[in-house]
Amino acid sequence: MVHNGAVVDTAPGAHDPISVHDQVVRATYACVARFGMAKTTVEDVVRESGLSRATIYRHFPGGREDLLRQAIAWEIGNFLGALADHVRDAPDLATLLDDGLGFARRAVVEHDLLQRMLQTEPDRLLGLVTTESFKTLPFIAAFLQPYLEREAAAGRLRAGVDLAEAGDHLGRLILSLIGAPGRWDLDDPAQRRMLVDRELLGGIRSV
Amino acid sequence: MAALGGTTMGTVLSARILDAARDCVARVGVSKTTLDDVAREAGCSRATLYRHFAGTGPLFEALIQRDLDRLDRRLAVATADLVYLADVCAAVLTTGVEFVLDHAALTTVLAVEPTVLLSAVSFDGSELFFARARALIAPHLWAHVGSDAERLAELLARIAISHLSSPRTEAPISDPEVVQHLVRTYVVPGFVREPTSERVQP
């Protein structure tokens, strides 16, 4: 890229598409945190990232909507990564679900930007969060698979449980509970234990 | 007699206005439906409409309430005479899912302005939604699970919402056999009552 490379993309690694992508997404997220989604423009992202408008459009051909969607997806990815790290070493599936629900609920309540956007622009936010959650459900189900397999190998599952289907079912309930705890107080360990033992694992774990 | 006649007339007109509101929403969605549209559809003046419903807020609230009453009657019919908890849960889920999928106004909102529904079932809006779902479903479960009825009602509502918003293509929730399987495998085991002393005695 002799004709433009030297002028615009001077930072080391700037030609690495992953790092440019990451740089733009982080810059977009910073803009959203500062201005909100409705007011964030491509020009803001240009200024924040230090990259050219042309570079940004090359990586995000959908423009502004594309940037916003990927910024939300990036933060959901961060959240899921932190959640996965938090529960990775759990000794069994019940402990994993118990700890994971407590951690996830705290993360949602304490996420300042999420809470602010739920007040100021819930429609835009929920639209994107929901589109991305179509990808979140398979992620959670896939994450749970090895743990379900371990439970099965240890003889702790009911006979005939379909592991993929059980993972899908658990993923649905987990996503539902994180977004909307309903009558459950997920900060209360006794309630979480009852929720996990009866509603999440009632039909999965052998008694 | 005059007062009684007046009330009946008012009730008939209210029902016609609610039908009109439902048809408008089914055509263009919630946010584009105005009181003028509804008055035109109902064939009454805006002033008359306003005497019954002081704005789109109260109008849509009355529409929701009427739908909840209708679904409540369907749930009563679907669960009457059922003996086993699994059958009751399956009947509740199947009736609820059918109600949503057959509802022209709800399906339009889902298609053209899904965030209106999403904000009602997630985060801050979800408290009212689940309170309503529990109030609607739990009475149909009392005879089977007693004080666990609210807990079970909420679980069934979660399952329905999840499958309606993210369908499992290989096992659609509109299929009664899928519902029976889900309920028997994952729901009922968490709600079976402890065996009572009468049962273990000969």
Image: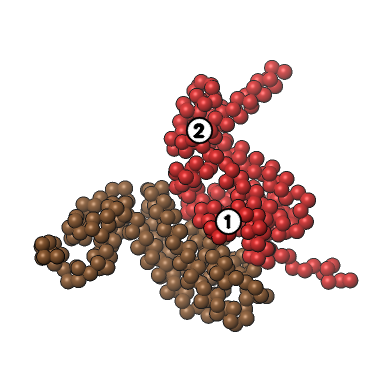
What kind of element bears circle 2?
A: helix
The chain under label 2 reads B
The chain letter of the red chain reads B
The residue sitting at the right extreme is: B202
The chain under label 1 reads B
> Which residue is drawn at the image coordinates 27% and 55% (left, top)?
A61
- Give percent across and percent down for residue A41: 25, 50
Tag 1: amino acid? Pro
Seen in the image, is B1 located left or right of residue A185? right
Q: Chain A shown in which color?
A: brown
Q: Can residue B135 be seen in this view?
A: no
Q: From the image, tell me which residue sits under label 1.
A: B172
User: Which marked residue is nearer to the observer: mark 1 or mark 2?
Assistant: 1
Q: In this view, does B47 lie above or below B156?
A: above
Q: Which quarter of the rendering shows the N terminus of chain B? A: top right
Seen in the image, is A53 located left or right of residue B133? left
Within 10 Å of the Cα at label 2, are there few (<14), some (14-19), or many (20+) other Cα atoms?
many
* Between A149 and B58, the one nearer to me in the picture: A149
In the image, which disc is placed on residue B24?
A: 2
- Give percent across and percent down for residue A63: 27, 52
Tag 2: amino acid? Cys
Residue B86, quarter of picture: bottom right
Q: How far, Cα to Cα, is label 1 from label 2?
A: 29 Å
In the image, which disc is placed on residue A8?
A: none
Q: Say if labels 1 and 2 share a chain.
A: yes
Q: Is residue A68 above or below residue A198?
A: above
